[in-house]
Amino acid sequence: MSLREYIKSFHQALEKFYDYGFAESIDVNNEIRAGKQAVIKSKIVFIDSSALYIKEYISAKYKIENISYAYQYQDKKGKTIFRYDNAVHRPDLSFKEHKHIADESIIEAATPRISELVDEVIEKLL
């Protein structure tokens, strides 16, 4: 999959929020960089005033690789419902890819595909 194909599939996955009638607004900013790299930033506001913030730094030099990412879903007051990321923590976690959940615990979790993330948010909105 090329970088442009990845970005297209990213946009298509987010359209599911409109298709289900959950999105109030979807803002996506794609910054394509030299060396087959891209930064994608998105903010999706839902009809219940919750919001999903997405930030991905992608490399497509050899294959699509998510170098760094953060997917933060929060309620209308800004309280985290869940967040996936691969940021380094202090003290160190015993795993890199992880998920913060509403009770403020952190669990090991693989990077979700954007379509899986969309489905998880939709489950919460139902």
Image: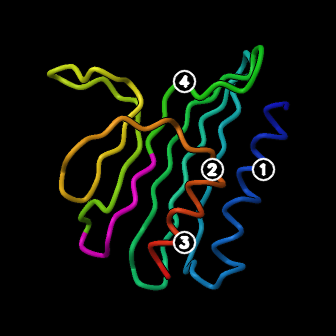
Q: Mark 1 vs mark 2: which is more N-terminal?
A: 1
Q: Tell me if 110 is positioned left or right of 11 in this view.
A: left
Q: Mark 4 vs mark 3: which is more N-terminal?
A: 4
User: From which residue to which does the magenta span run?
Assistant: 71-77
Q: Which residue is mark 1?
A: 9
**As shown in the figure, which amino acid type bears the numbered disc 4?**
Ile
Q: Mark 4 vs mark 1: which is more N-terminal?
A: 1
Separation (CA) of disc 1 from disc 2: 9 Å
Q: Which residue is mark 3?
A: 122
Q: Position of residue 111 (x, y in %)?
A: 52, 37
**As shown in the figure, which amino acid type bears the numbered disc 1?**
Ser
Look at the numbered disc 2 and give the secondary structure of its residue: helix
Residue drawn at point x = 66 percent, y = 31 percent: 38
**As shown in the figure, which amino acid type bears the numbered disc 3?**
Ile
Q: Which residue is mark 2?
A: 114
Separation (CA) of disc 4 from disc 3: 26 Å
Asked if marks 1 and 2 touch (Cβ < 8 Å), the reply is yes
Q: Tell me if 112 is positioned left or right of 14 in this view.
A: left
Q: Which residue is mark 4?
A: 67
Q: Position of residue 39 (x, y in %)?
A: 60, 35
Q: Mark 2 vs mark 3: which is more N-terminal?
A: 2
Task: Sort mark 1 into few (<14), some (14-19) or many (20+) by Cα contacts within 10 Å.
Answer: some
Task: Sort mark 3 into few (<14), some (14-19) or many (20+) by Cα contacts within 10 Å.
Answer: some
**As shown in the figure, which amino acid type bears the numbered disc 2?**
Ile
Question: Up-down: is 3 above or below 16?
Answer: above
